Image: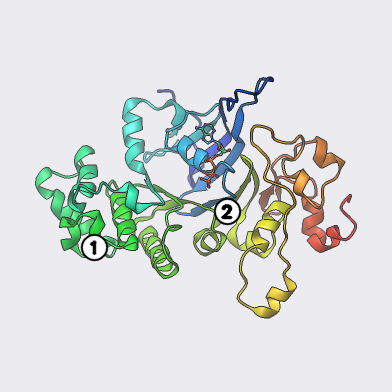
Amino acid sequence: MAEIPALPPDVLLDVRGLTKLFPPRRSLFQRKAANPVRAVEDVSFEIRQGETLGLVGESGCGKSTVTRLLLGIHRPTAGTMRYRRKDGGSVDLDRLSEDERLAYCTDLRIVFQDPQSSLNPRLQVRDIVGEVLKVNKLVPPAEIEAKVRDLLAKVGLRPEYARRYPHAFSGGERQRVGIARALATHPRLVVLDEAVSALDVSVRAQTLNLLRDLQEEFGLTYLFVSHDLSVIEYICDRVVVMYVGQVVEIATSEALFARPLHPYTEALLSALPIPDPAQRRQNRRIRLPGEVADPANRPPGCAFHPRCRFATEACRTTPPPLRDLRGRSVACHHAEALALKGVETIQTGHANA
Ligand SMILES: Nc1ncnc2c1ncn2[C@@H]1O[C@H](COP(=O)(O)OP(=O)(O)OP(=O)(O)O)[C@@H](O)[C@H]1O
C-alpha cells in the first residue's frame, strides 16, 4: 500500500473535497432525466488529536453521509479522507489494505443514537461487549468476562450488570453499555452519532459529563454529530456547520456561539433558548423563508441564497468558496461585512456591501 503525504502531528483525520452523489430518485411521471442527489459536496475539515469536533446542521444536510463515508459504509464519489496511523504514517481511508481496514475498525468506533436498537436484545451485556473483544482477539477467552466488568465500571455501571439483558436497563444505562462496547477496542476516534439525542435532559447531562471524563482518561478524540446546538455548545471544541451537503462555517465553539459569520449559522443559533429574559428580548429569532433546498436541485450560486436576507447578485450566480477569515472558515460572499459591521447593520441597508 503506497504511503501518502504525512499529516501534521496534531491532525488525526483530514477530509478534503469529500463528495457523495447518490443515483437520481426515480419517478414514473418524470419525463426529464432526474439529477443525482448531491448528499455531500466538496466537504473539507480536519479532526485534531484529542478534540471534540461537532458536525451540525438540519435534517438532510449530509451529516450521516459524512459519517458513513468515514466508516466505509459508502464509498466517496470524489475527495480524500486521510487518517494518521498510530505509527505516525498516513493512509487514505478509501484505499485501505485488508490489514489496515481491520486496524482502522478498532481505532475508530461509533456510538449510535438509539441504544435500544443498537444492542442485541437476546444477548447478555457480557456477550454484547465480549463479542467485540473476542472478534478482535483483544483478550484471551478466559479473561473476557473480567474485561467486560472492568469496562462497565469505567462507564459507571455495576460490574454485575454484565449478566443482564438490554431490556433490564434504563435508556441512559443502555447508552453507557453502547459506550463501553465502543471503548472495548481502545479506539482513538469515537463518532458519537446523535448519541445523547434520545435521552431525557438530566440523563443527557450525565452522559455528556461521562463522555468528557472518558475523553480525558483515555485521550479520545470525538466527532460529535448532532442537530442539538445546546449539546454542541456544551461539549465541542470546534464546530463544522453544514447546509444542503456543504460546509458553510467552521469555528471554535466559543467564536461560533459568540458571533456566527454565516447567515445560516446565525439563523440556526437564533433558535437556541436563552435563559436570561433581558437578553432574550434583545435576541430576535430569525425565521428563514422557504424550505431547505433539495440536494438533487441545489440552487445556483450559494445554496442558501433563496433564504438569505443578505443575498446579492454574486450570491445568486457564484458559489462562495470556504475561505479563512479571522482564524475560522466561512463560505459567504459577505462574511467580511458580517464580521466587521455585525449582522444588524447589514440587515438595515448594506446588504450590497
Ligand atoms: N442511500 C441514499 N440514496 C439516496 N439518497 C440518499 C441516501 N442516503 C442519504 N440520501 C440523501 O442525502 C441527503 C443527506 O442525507 P443524510 O442522511 O446524510 O442527512 P442528515 O443530515 O444525516 O439527516 P438526519 O439528521 O435526518 O439523519 C438527504 O437528502 C437524503 O435523502
Give the camera-side residue of 141 and 310: 310
Marks 1 and 2, how far apart at CA = 31 Å
Please determine whether, in this image, residue 301 is positioned above or below residue 166: above
In the image, residue 343 lies at what x, y percent? 79, 60
Q: Quadrant of ligand 1?
A: top right
Indicate the secondary structure of the residue bearing disc 1: helix
The residue under the point 46% across, 37% down is 68
Mark 1 = which residue? 153
Task: Judge left or right: residue 281 versus residue 128.
Answer: right
Q: Position of residue 350 (x, y in %)?
A: 89, 55
Q: Position of residue 153 (x, y in %)?
A: 23, 62
Rendered residue at 39%/63% (across/down)? 207
Q: Classify mark 2: residues with Cα within 10 Å, few (<14), some (14-19) or many (20+).
A: many
Report if residue 132 is visible in the image.
yes
Along the horizontal axis of the image, is 115 left or right of 138?
A: right
Question: For this view, does 91 lie left or right of residue 22?
Answer: left
Neighbourhood count class around disc 1 (C-alpha, 10 Å): few under 14, some 14–19, many 20 upward? some
Q: Which mark is residue 239?
A: 2
Q: Quadrant of residue 322?
A: top right
- State the residue at coordinates (43%, 23%): 2
Q: Is residue 154 above or below residue 131?
A: below
**Is residue 342 something one can see in this rendering?**
no
What is the image's colouring? rainbow
Q: Is mark 1 within 8 Å of ligand 1?
A: no
Closer to the chain start, of discs 1 and 2, is 1
Relative horizontal placement of residue 246, taking residue 175 as reference (left or right) = right
Quadrant location, the N terminus? top left
State the mark number for residue 204: none
Q: Amino acid at mark 2?
A: Val
- Type of amino acid at the residue the image marks with label 1: Ala
